[in-house]
Amino acid sequence: MLSGTLIRAGEGVIALLAGANHDPAVFGAPERIHPERVGPRHLAFGYGLHLCLGHTLARAELRAVFETLPRLFPNMRLPPDGAPPLFADGAFVYGVEGLNVEW
């Protein structure tokens, strides 16, 4: 049984990547973007044998973005009552497609 659903021997189960890191019991306010968040490591790049080969490059690119944008746009911020991020949830890889900011 998984969440009340019987899974018989030989039946497949597919875990949706979009659901990773969204458990509010583990990640406080999981729907919010919070670059300085501390706590459990997320699963966005997989783990162990399934670790994404590009994770080092992706993390370096994100670090460059989060260090450079505040220097170039010191007044940039998320709008207090702005629209939530637009997610690319129709693709194989789930991620943010758009984010409203103001400066």
Image (tube, rainbow, N blue to C red):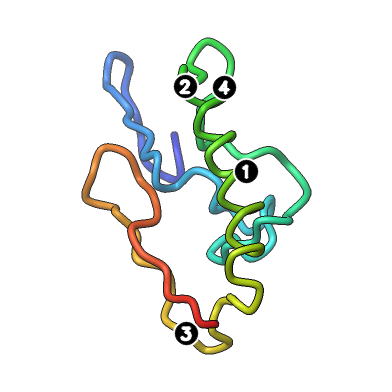
Q: Which class describes the residues within 10 Å of circle 1: few (<14), some (14-19), or many (20+)?
A: few
Residue 36, by quadrant, is bottom right
Q: Pick whichever of labels 1 and 4 is earlier in the sequence.
A: 4
* Disc 2: CA contacts within 10 A as few (<14), some (14-19) or many (>=20): few
Q: Quadrant of residue 41?
A: top right
Alpha carbon separation for disc pair 3 and 1 = 24 Å
In percent of width and height, residue 78 lies at 56, 77
Q: Residue furthest top?
A: 49
Q: Amino acid at mark 1?
A: Arg
Q: Which residue is mark 3?
A: 82
For marks 2 and 4, give the one nearer the viewer.
2
C-alpha separation, residue under disc 1 versus residue under disc 4: 20 Å
Q: Residue at x 66, y 62 (%)?
A: 71
3D distance between C-alphas at marks 3 and 2 = 32 Å
Q: Which residue is mark 2?
A: 52
Disc 4 residue crowd, few under 14, some 14–19, many 20+, Cα 10 Å: few
**Any mark on residue 22, and which?**
none
Q: Which residue is mark 4?
A: 47
**Residue in the picture at 66% in, 56% down:** 35
Looking at the rendered image, the quarter that the C terminus falls into is bottom right
Tell me the element at label 3: loop
Instruction: Look at mark 1 in the image and give the residue it sits on.
Output: 63
Q: Residue at x 64, y 64 (%)?
A: 70
Q: Amino acid at mark 2?
A: Cys
Q: Nearer the viewer, mark 1 or mark 4?
A: 1
Q: Amino acid at mark 3?
A: Gly
Q: Amino acid at mark 4?
A: Tyr
State the residue in front, 45 or 30.
45
